[in-house]
Image (cartoon, rainbow, N blue to C red):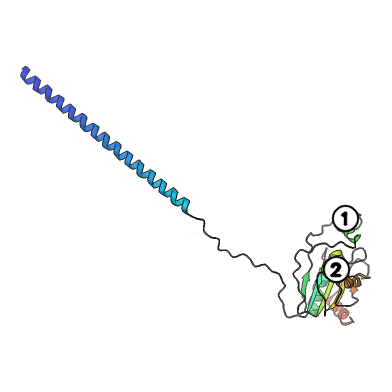
Amino acid sequence: MKRIIIPFLMMLCMMGLSACGNSENESDTASSVTITQTEAQQTETAEQEENSNDMSAPADTTAAPEKVDHVETTGRDTIVVFFSATGTTKGVAERIANVTNADLYEIIPAEPYCDADLDWNDKNSRTTIEMNDPDARPAIADDIVSFDGYSTVYIGYPIWWGDAPRIMSTFVETHDFSGLTVIPFCTSGGSGIGRSGSNLASQAGNGNWLDGDRLDGGISEDELSTWISGLN
């Protein structure tokens, strides 16, 4: 009996050892596969990051807008230049341009005038301070007009404190009126053109300046035609 049991027990032990060995081999193989997969993932991630770091931003191929430094010529020989703080002078200037088939150019201040600036009852308002200073020269936003090709220039403005606004002095002192006929006109609540036109002519220093006139804000194109026909 013992002879039968002993070989049987030895056989069971050998089978157990074989199973343990296979289990360890399978575990080692699984661990090896896991490590290999992890290393591959890390390598792929590193390559992706490296490629990402090497990518440069696409070049901006959008062309910058060209800077306009002049007014395109239209072939017309007359231009109406005006400054208008409230729109009254602008309306008259537009009608003159229609009647004379002229180009139109608006003088825009670099610092626009607000209602408080235009309060002539306020001794500390911007316009009061400017008009009390003969040397004040308010800046113009984009002075790009050229008189090349023109023979006649109408210059319009409101009357402030009996004279042209100081921004008109800024304009005429920085442009050449040689060989041009210059016709000043103004709008106001009741004051005439006075010496405003002749003052601007003196500041310009050249050009054939006519006397000009005060024009009502509601003047019609027919009335403007009559006025223009009577200019000397």
- Looking at the rendered structure, the kind of residue marked 1 is Ser
Q: Is 156 drawn above or below residue 150 in the view shown? A: above
The residue beneath circle 1 is: 125
- Specify whether 139 is left or right of 65: right
Residue in the image at 77% along x and 71% along y = 105
Q: Element at badge 2?
A: strand
The residue beneath circle 2 is: 157
Q: Residues within 10 Å of mark 1 (few under 14, many from 20)?
A: some
Gap between marks 1 and 2, in whole Å?
19 Å
- Looking at the rendered structure, the kind of residue marked 2 is Tyr
Relative image position of residue 51 (x, y in whole percent): 44, 52
- In depth, the one of 118 and 36 nearer the eye is 36
Instruction: Please state the total of marks drawn on the protein image.
Output: 2
Callouts 1 and 2 close, C-beta under 8 Å: no
Relative image position of residue 35 (x, y in whole percent): 33, 39
Q: Element at badge 1?
A: loop
Q: Quadrant of residue 185?
A: bottom right
Relative image position of residue 4 (x, y in whole percent): 6, 20
The quadrant of the image that shows the N terminus is top left
